[in-house]
Amino acid sequence: MTDIALAQRLEHFLEGTWTGSKRVQGIQGGARAWLLAQLAARERRPMLVVCSSALEAENFYDDLNFFLGEERAQAPFRKRLHLFPSWEVLPFENLSPHPDNIAGRLEGLYKLVEESAPILIATPAALMQKVIAKEALKQSYLYLVAGQDLRRDSLLEHLVQWGFQNVPLVEERGDFSVRGGIVDVFSPGYGRPLRLEFDGDRLESIREFNPATQRTAQLQEEMLLLPMKDFSLKQSGVENALRRLDQRASELEVDRREKNSLLESMRSGIPFPGIEFLVPYFAGTLVPVFSYLPKETLLWLDGADRPLHYDPDQSLWAV
């Protein structure tokens, strides 16, 4: 089959009615991402791409990002495409997931809540892990605009509550520092940190800056401040959560000194390796990622041997 004939068949396929499941075979490499990019240009609805492994997901993300023409340095609320990672850490290893993985998952959930047509690329491992409910998520992020009324102390409290670390010099995502009326913060989803300048209780300006030279660059009119943790140790109800955790530790016969040290660290808001696995005690009921997906979501199963049916009301792809 010639390239022209193949292009015509694909064009005819894309113009079809999108209900139920459809199967596409024989498309290799970057052509899969090209086909999805063509569909994304026609269909303004959420899309979820499921790849077999983290490496396959990263490769598909790179290919699709190329065809969509998005810049990685764009603000998170200006990008349609997002790579939704797993924690990549097994339970009970006394290790915390990489901060970028935690923040990446929360950014993906934000897109499903606040944006009309996001494209998420994930793996089965990433989708199997439950997440916080929408109501809890909505408390964790802030949308800031230059010129708005905002108490600096309220912002600093929010940063501490949702996993940001107060450091002398901001260099990595999740860092923030304070110097008088200036707050530097490196929020998830951004390629560079931002400098917030306050004049009393007014956010006067937002500027991007280079963490190596500390020199400010272009002025920003707005920013999205996403969380670095799934839950806050400062929010109301922490004592009830600690009592449940204390009871569970006693049931499991955890060493008394180890249990008391853990509880005191959490009561003081001091993070420790593996704290993220205690999120069910603090964030309430966890929910499946699929509960965030609108009914019109298009599911693309990359490399599947056969189509899998998740919901008859949703379109399903196997490539």
Image (cartoon, grey):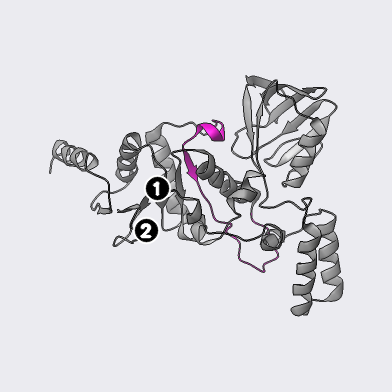
**Sequence order check: which comes first, mark 2 or mark 1?**
1
Horizontal side of 50 relative to 164 (left or right) equals: left
144 up-or-down from 267: above or below: above
Looking at the image, do the residues carrying marks 2 and 1 touch, with CB atoms under 8 Å apart?
A: no
Picture quadrant of residue 4? top left
Q: Alpha-carbon distance for marks 2 and 1?
A: 10 Å
- The residue located at (73%, 40%) in the rendering is 175
Question: Is residue 231 in view?
Answer: yes
Residue under pointer 1 = 297
157 up-or-down from 318: above or below: above
- The residue located at (85%, 55%) in the rendering is 268
* Residue type, mark 2 in image: Asp
Residue 157 percent location from the top left of the image: 79, 40
Residue 68 percent location from the top left of the image: 39, 34
Residue under pointer 2 = 311
Residue 302 percent location from the top left of the image: 35, 53
User: What SS does tag 2 mark?
Assistant: loop
Crowd tier of the residue under label 2, counting other residues whose Cα lies within 10 Å: few below 14, some 14–19, many 20 or above: few
257 up-or-down from 134: above or below: below
Identify which residue, 297 or 222, lies in the foreground.
297
Picture quadrant of residue 168? top right
Instruction: Report the magenta residues as a range.
Output: 73-97
Magenta part, dominant SS: loop
* Residue type, mark 1 in image: Thr
Identify which residue, 314 or 217, lies in the foreground.
314
Residue 174 percent location from the top left of the image: 70, 42
- The residue located at (68%, 22%) in the rendering is 146
